[in-house]
Image (cartoon, rainbow, N blue to C red):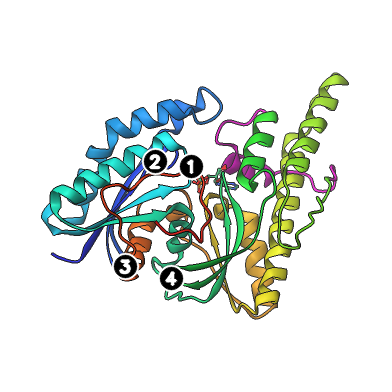
Amino acid sequence: MSGLILGIETSCDDTAAAVARGREVLSSVVSSQIAEHRKYGGVVPEIASRRHTENVTAVTREALSRAGADYSDISAVAVTYAPGLIGALLVGVNFAKGLALSLGVPLVPVHHLRGHIAANYIESALEPPFLALTVSGGNTQLVAVEGYTEFRTLGRTVDDAAGECFDKAARAMGLPYPGGAELDRVADDGKAGLYKLPRPVTAGEYDFSFSGLKTAVLNTVNTARQKGGEADVPALAGALRRTVCEILRDKTLAAADSIGAEKIALAGGVSANSMLRRLMADACRDTGRELYLPDPRYCGDNAAMIAVQGYYELAAGHTAGSALNAYASMGIEGTA
Ligand code: KG4
């Protein structure tokens, strides 16, 4: 076998490795640390780094084994180098660096959000240009994808990310971490119209703001308790889900109009949200646009998306030397 790219992802609480040939994924292994972080109600950065250190070699071996490949079949190592938890990122970057050096193959740095967008290339024929809505626990952005390695940010959250808003609101409602997926499930049983939440206003037309919504949910929960009762969790979860998803849909459509985008892709953990997928599907059908949704396996953090984006970064000559560093924050336009 040849022409295989090994992807490594350790930006948060998933240790992941994958093998891909171009945009065809041969294997994808994700070792989740959720059970351990759940005890603390969120990701503990030092624990995440330590678990990556312990697991990254075994996860990589497993990815190679499932692909029926060996280290000698790997022709490049792609790794997430920004943005994310710095200690967690450094584990993956140093592992990838050592591996690339020992194998004598190129080291390809991949921006995490470029990777999330590339999850849409797996099992689809999507090609740029298109508009991407990247929605995860740490980011909410509207990005014009002008080429496989050319990006222009049109708008972003000015405070919390959509996933962070879901997670913090879910925690206040007593739902287990990570709350986004649980809130999505619980909301299905919620009575509509019981709660009305504010629609935040932002200065930038394509920017987002979710911290006010989070506070409104926290206030609703606390007010109910002060009165000796409890908020109706399914109804409140339903109101929050609808409000967040409608904001995401409306801003995405406005941004698509502004750049004349005929294709829209969702990316990141929140793109697994059932209502967001439904609302976007309806909106794209009504406006004659094509909608691309990553397979649920590739919505959350994984290394398949890193290997696939790594293929395009490598083709564009974006490789790094042994001095490659990791960065906690970096805009999607940045190159190594
Ligand atoms: O992309 P991801 O796995 O990690 C980051 O890079 O942040 O996204 C994780 C985020 C969390 O906030 C999680 O609660 C949210 O995605 N999430 C969801 C759903 N599934 C995961 N949010 C809403 N609805 C879901 N079904």
Q: In percent of the image, x 79 and y 26: which residue is there?
A: 230
Residue 317 - label: 3
Q: Is residue 301 left or right of residue 242?
A: left
* Residue type marked 2: Leu
Density class for disc 4 (Cα within 10 Å; few <14, some 14-19, many ≥20) is some
Q: Give the residue at mark 2.
A: 89
Tell me if residue 70 can be seen: no
In this view, the mark in front (3 or 4): 3
Q: Give the residue at mark 1.
A: 328
Q: Position of residue 267 (x, y in %)?
A: 52, 58
- Asked whether the beta carbons under mark 1 and mark 2 sit within 8 Å of each other, the answer is yes
Q: Quadrant of the N terminus?
A: bottom left
Q: Which residues are magenta?
A: 173-196
Image vertical order of residue 301 relative to residue 228, above or below: below
Which is more N-terminal, label 4 or label 3? Answer: 4
Q: Is residue 129 left or right of residue 76?
A: right
Residue 160 found in image quarter: top right
* Residue type marked 4: Tyr
What element does badge 4 sit on? loop
* Residue type marked 3: Gly
Which is more N-terminal, label 4 or label 2? Answer: 2
Which is more N-terminal, label 3 or label 1? Answer: 3
Q: Position of residue 94 (x, y in %)?
A: 28, 41
Q: Position of residue 30 (x, y in %)?
A: 35, 44
Image vertical order of residue 117 relative to residue 83, above or below: below
